Amino acid sequence: MKVDTGMSRLGVAPSEVVAVVTRAAALGLDVVGVMTHLANADVEDPAQPDATTWAQLDAFDAAIAAVRATGAPVTSCHAANSPGAMVFPRARRDLVQVGLALALATAGGPTDAALAAARRCASSPTSRSCAGCRPARGSATAASA
């Protein structure tokens, strides 16, 4: 389950996690993972106690505790993107998402050969969209039906 702790892009509001987990359980589904996405870890100084990343991590910790209090069998938690993993050690949980760090790895560096396969990506575009939906990253254009 993705918890929106401040990215304001996707996810369940922290105040709604218990209701979502309870509804999932009623449908026979277990919530086994909880994640969030750090909005500003790439531009904030971890030495600043008022950094929004710290507030996001506090909200995430509270959401995890609330989910676990329902008895949900949570086995993995994830908060750190590339800057979060490198600059905010408290963001490192069971998993980290270091896509940007892999994509921008310095050519010829000591791990270049090992990361070469990870940097290659194959994908196929889809036509999945809904009327009125907006792509992520602040697009001003809504999809048509």
Image (cartoon, rainbow, N blue to C red):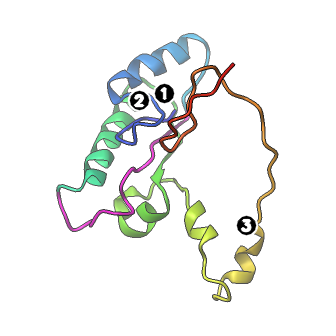
Residue picked out by circle 3: 118
User: Which range of residues does the magenta coloring cover?
Assistant: 32-49
Q: Between label 3 and label 2, give the one nearer the viewer.
A: 3
Q: Amino acid at mark 1?
A: Ala
| 142 part of magenta stretch | no
Q: Locate the C terminus and report the quarter of the image it occupies.
A: top right
Q: Could you tell whether 37 is left or right of 24 in the image?
A: left
Relative to 109, say whether 83 is above or below: above
The percent position of residue 20, horizontal first and vertical second, equals: 46, 19
Q: Secondary structure under badge 2?
A: helix
Q: CA distance from mark 3 to mark 1?
A: 33 Å
Q: Amino acid at mark 3?
A: Ala
Dividing the picture into quarters, in which one does residue 51 lie?
Answer: bottom left
Q: Is residue 136 above or below residue 23?
A: below
Residue 40 lies in the magenta-colored region: yes
Q: Which mark is residue 67?
A: 2
Left or right of 118 on screen, residue 110: left
Q: Is residue 59 left or right of residue 123?
A: left
Q: Label 1: state its secondary structure.
A: loop
Q: Are marks 2 and 1 in contact (CB under 8 Å)?
A: yes
Q: Is residue 31 above or below residue 99?
A: above
Please tell me the numbered disc located at residue 124. none
- Front residue of 17 and 116: 116
Mark 3 or 1, nearer chain start: 1
What residue do we see at 54% from left, 16% from top? 25
User: Which residue is drawn at the image coordinates 60% and 77% (left, top)?
Assistant: 105
- Residue 72 tag number: 1
Q: Tell me the CA gap for discs 2 and 1.
A: 6 Å
Neighbor class of circle 3 (other Cα within 10 Å; few <14, some 14-19, many 20+) is few
